[in-house]
Amino acid sequence: MLKMEKEKLIEELEKHNWKVVEVARGYGVSRQRIYQLIEKFGIELPPRLHRVKVACLNCGKEIEVKKSVAKIKKRFFCSPECRKNYIYMELTCATCGKKFLKRKKEYEWHTGKHWQEALKEKHFCSKKCWGRYVGVNFSGWKKQRRGNERKADSSEGATASIEIQ
């Protein structure tokens, strides 16, 4: 067991830039033992030196991350929920009313429009729902056109046919 005085422990921590791992290696004990001594003596460790504050891209909440990670990564989120809300938009199917997610960038890439314009348009959760919508709303024009052709054929007789374009 390592027995130390408070002043000697503080001196060692300052000497090693408050890195508990290096102090533990120097004395041949575990980090946990050094943390136990720190707690026993009531020593307050300084705030983490190698951390920077960044803002969540979705909600703007400040998050602490390692400096090395901040150099590599450019997008930070405070929670998985914020990440989901930043990447996906929630849409409602125009046919069945089911809610589903669609990637914002995918919408922008396919349509060339900003993703917020998608909220004004009709969207479908599947091809089946899209087919139902088209069948109900647009199937009548073919029947109506065919009906007009038949009426014209019957009024002039069977000899002439009228083409409607």
Image (tube, grey):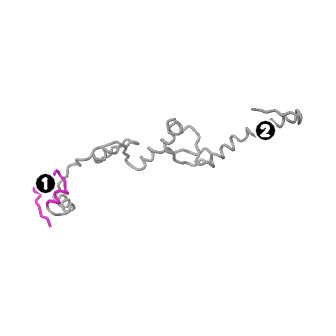
Residue nearer the viewer, 105 or 77: 105
Residue drawn at the location 26% of the way across and 46% of the way down: 51
Give the total number of marks visible in the rendering. 2
The N terminus, quarter of image: bottom left
Mark pair 2, 1: CA separation: 93 Å
Q: What secondary structure is the magenta-colored segment mainly?
A: helix
Residue drawn at the location 36% of the way across and 45% of the way down: 76
* Amino acid type at image mark 2: Arg
Characterize the local packing of mark 1: few (<14), some (14-19) or many (20 or more) Cα atoms within 10 angstroms. Answer: some
Give the labeled residue for mark 1: 10
Residue drawn at the location 83% of the way across and 34% of the way down: 161
Q: Is residue 142 left or right of residue 62?
A: right
Displayed quadrant of residue 41: bottom left
x, y percent for residue 21:
20, 57
Q: Is residue 138 left or right of residue 27?
A: right
Residue drawn at the location 32% of the way across and 42% of the way down: 54
x, y percent for residue 37:
17, 60
| Residues drawn in magenta | 1-26
The C terminus, quarter of image: top right
Sequence-earlier tag: 2 or 1: 1
Residue 132 colored in magenta in the image? no
Give the labeled residue for mark 2: 146
